[in-house]
Image (cartoon, helix red, strand yellow):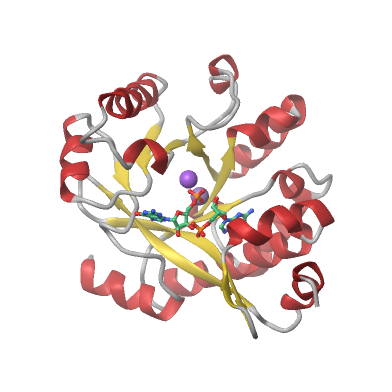
Amino acid sequence: LSLENSLRYALDRGELELHYQPQVSLESGRVTGVEALLRWRHPHRGWISPAQFIPLAEENGLIVPIGEWVLNTACAQAKTWRTTEGLPLTIAVNLSARQFLQANFIAQIDQILGQCDLAATALKLEITESLLMQDLKRAITTLHALKERGLQLAIDDFGTGYSSLNYLKRFPLDQLKIDRAFIRDITREPDDAAIAQAIIALAHSLKLEVMAEGVESEAQVAFLRTKFCHAIQGYYVSRPLPPEQLAHWVRENR
Ligand code: G
Ligand code: G
Ligand code: MN
Ligand code: NA
């Protein structure tokens, strides 16, 4: 079976899972939320990274049912954590272009939030610059509809995509996530440090929250603190964890 064909059955067979990576406020030191990250446990090939199968799913349209499953699963999990388990976490979900640009995307969000009985403010959507630039008019309309409902909106992988700073101010955003490519050598490469610093300054002046991704060391945290970066995510805090382990981790680290 080709990867494409097995992906068609992966959803039905329950081979897809979400793992969750903590996001921590640098100011309070507290876990404020988690990012849901898709994992495919293939029966023969083992773990397959979303970097391998998301582009495939984008191409053949499977991203639509997969994306809907991700939103449903993440929102249901967040509801359980917030009510039954008393963990007030925000849930961040990655969106692909095809999903976001669907005609019924807003209706889907309303339906999922309603069905899960989850407050819209508890859901954060991570969208890339390139996605937004694909259909600017539609993106602006959709983002405003989401913002009206109270959802949080983040730009993922900021600095790597094709974007226009001119449009940044027209999007009703809450957060910029600095791509981990800039964070990796932040303490060694003056250029990367300059870029990260510039993104943080841009976020401050646009009154957006700024989160660094891929943070792996104390030295990187120290640098980000001096620039007043608001929040971090990365192996330094924790790897992405399955849901039971995540809840345990949050209880131990809050
Ligand atoms: O978790 P990992 O580093 O392997 O993720 C690789 C890429 O897959 C990242 O760019 C991430 O944003 C993307 N990704 C992870 N989960 C999802 C998902 O549920 N939907 C979409 N569209 N992309 C995802
Ligand atoms: O594109 P996006 O930001 O959604 O990608 C998130 C991906 O980055 C996840 O697949 C996750 O596994 C990976 N990731 C998370 N933290 C780190 C880290 O500290 N270092 C590295 N190299 N990858 C990370
Ligand atoms: Mn992301
Ligand atoms: Na990223």
Q: Position of residue 46 (x, y in %)?
A: 57, 79
Q: Quadrant of residue 76?
A: bottom right
Does the rendering let one see residue 68?
yes
Question: Who is closer to the viewer here, 114 or 53?
Answer: 53
* Res. 197 image quadrant: top left
Closer to the camera in the image, 5 or 170: 5
How many numbered discs? 0
Horizontal side, residue 52 vs residue 7: left or right: left
Which quadrant of the figure has residue 22? bottom left
Q: From where the camera sits, is residue 113 visible?
A: no
- Percent position of residue 187, x then y: 21, 36
- Residue at 70 percent across and 53 percent down: it is 55
Pick the front one: 45 or 156: 45
Could you tell me residue 159's position as x and y percent?
A: 48, 29
At x 75%, y 25%, the residue is: 137
**Front in this rendered view, residue 133 or 192:** 192
In this rendering, the answer to whether 13 lies above or below 138 is below
Q: Residue at x 31, y 47 (%)?
A: 232
In this picture, residue 88 sits left or right of residue 15? left
Q: Residue at x 27, y 73 (%)?
A: 251
| In the rendered image, the vertical position of residue 86 relative to residue 107, given as above or below | below
The vertical placement of 147 against 193, above or below, is below
Task: Left or right? Give the position of 158 relative to 200.
Answer: right
Q: Quadrant of the C terminus?
A: bottom left
> In what quadrant of the picture does the N terminus appear?
bottom right
Vertical relation: 57 (above or below) 159: below
Q: Is residue 235 left or right of residue 2?
A: left
